[in-house]
Image (cartoon, rainbow, N blue to C red):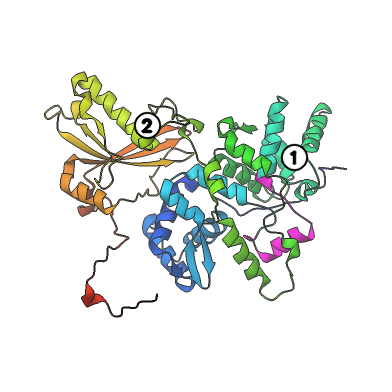
Amino acid sequence: MYNPDIQYRCTIIRGKSILKMDNYLPIYSEILNEICPIPAKSFAKTFDEKLSEYMKVDSNSKRIKNHRTESVDKLLGLIFEKEGIIYLSDRSIKYLRDNDQPALFKSICYKFQQPNGSQKISTTIDKIQHNISFKPYHFVLSLLKLARQKSVLLTKKEIAYYVLNALQVLQGKVSVDEVLSVILYDREKGLKKEVDISKNYAWGYQHINEQFDYLKLANLIREDKEKVWLNTKEQIAIDYFIDNLNKPLALDYSKYNLEEKKIGKKIESDWQIYFGSLDQIEEDKFKTSINSLDTGSLMVPERPADSQSSTELGNDGEIFVFNHEKNIVKSFNPRLVNKVKPFWKIKGLGYDIISIEASRNLKNPEFTRYIEVKTTKRVSKPNFTDTWDSINMTRNEWVAAEQHKDHFYIYRIYFTNDGTFVSIINDPVRKNNENILYATPTTYRVEFSDQAVDEKLKLA
């Protein structure tokens, strides 16, 4: 019989605040994209030196090391090691392609299980010995869906006590229905049960709070100071979690020989490879639409389900900027609206939209603006007072910036749960020359003739 009073402190890897996670993720990814693949023996020093340049902190500091060992590797699953080489994980590669931060955290929550290989071997062994077998985020989302169906709002403290710290639930022996029934029974009896924090808050409750943070970063829940509920605009992803709740754990650690030599390294390696992997179904299910974010009033039209239209030719950020520019020009002079033109379908131009200065330059209102749009989706609003943001520009985009100079603009769009934010950068080439921003070439185009060829083979 389910007894929630049998408590077990099932910890996770400690994370950072939601804002810091959102802010640091682009930096981690860009550094990794620049240096990987890289020999494992060189990885720590190289990554730490790169990150210290962003953070203006000594590369030997514990703070820098923690970013690498806890966030980049264990928590976010951005890398994996194979045969002495550190590679980008599938999760990193996808994020570098689409800048969809909630989708990345959906993947993290979906892959996460207890026990796992991200913690000390002693912690993992303890969980195995206690027969822990649990998908925390699948279970919580299932519980919240059932509560919603019954018009019940659960509190974070209830989920903490009756689920995330309840041994029998963690062992996979209790259903979602049983948990909700006991919560409601105890409510009716006036019983308020909370996780013990007699030692200190961090020991007893912080790892619980951080599990809710990851669900918020994944855009799957909403909360106030006390209660938590589903973000039903993410129903496709939520249902995918729920549908897979009762499938066996991807990695069954009870089958490992814990007496085996270097078993800790094997557990860590197996986990690392699995945790950062991503399949096409997950990619499709975890996409974050701007309609699922609390972006406020947007000028991005709904996309048709089965038909192609002009809106489908660009991403949400490009469409947003296109509409934004049309409104600015229209308010200045309606006859000039046709000067705002989308070019995102034409590859290799180096910009996405052409607009005009309009009211922003009354002396030369019909001067052209060449606009390159860079879009990201994240939970929190951007705040780079103590860190940096980064974007990738192609060679053609940089050449266009060099050619058009102060007529070239980067529109950095952030779709967030705090609204939509735009950072506009004019003439990035000049700013790079003045060390206001920093552009680093990360790829090389190699052209060669026969003179450079050392050997020619015909193998078939």
**Residue under the point 19% across and 31% down:** 356
Q: How would you rate the neighbour count of disc 1 (Cα within 10 Å): few for under 14, some for 14-19, many for 20 or more? A: some
Q: Is residue 286 visible?
A: no
Residue reaching furthest to the left: 363
Q: Earlier in the sequence, mark 2 or mark 1?
A: 1
Residue reaching furthest to the right: 1
**The C terminus: image quadrant:** bottom left
| Type of the residue with mark 1 | Glu
The numbered disc on residue 25 is none
Q: Is residue 124 visible?
A: yes
**The N terminus: image quadrant:** top right
Q: Which residue is mark 2?
A: 311
Q: CA distance from mark 2 to mark 1?
A: 50 Å
**Residue under the point 76% across and 38% down:** 176
When the figure is inspected, residue 437 is found, relative to residue 79, above or below; the finding is: above
Callout 2: helix, strand or loop?
helix
Callout 1: helix, strand or loop?
loop
Q: Is 178 left, or right, of 41 in this rendering?
A: right
Instruction: Give the quadrant of residue 404.
Output: top left
Span of residues in magenta: 117-137
Residue 411, image x and y in percent? 30, 39
| Type of the residue with mark 2 | Thr
Residue 113, image x and y in percent? 67, 52
**Residue under the point 81% across and 42% down:** 4
Q: Which residue is mark 1?
A: 194
Q: Are marks 2 and 1 in contact (CB under 8 Å)?
A: no
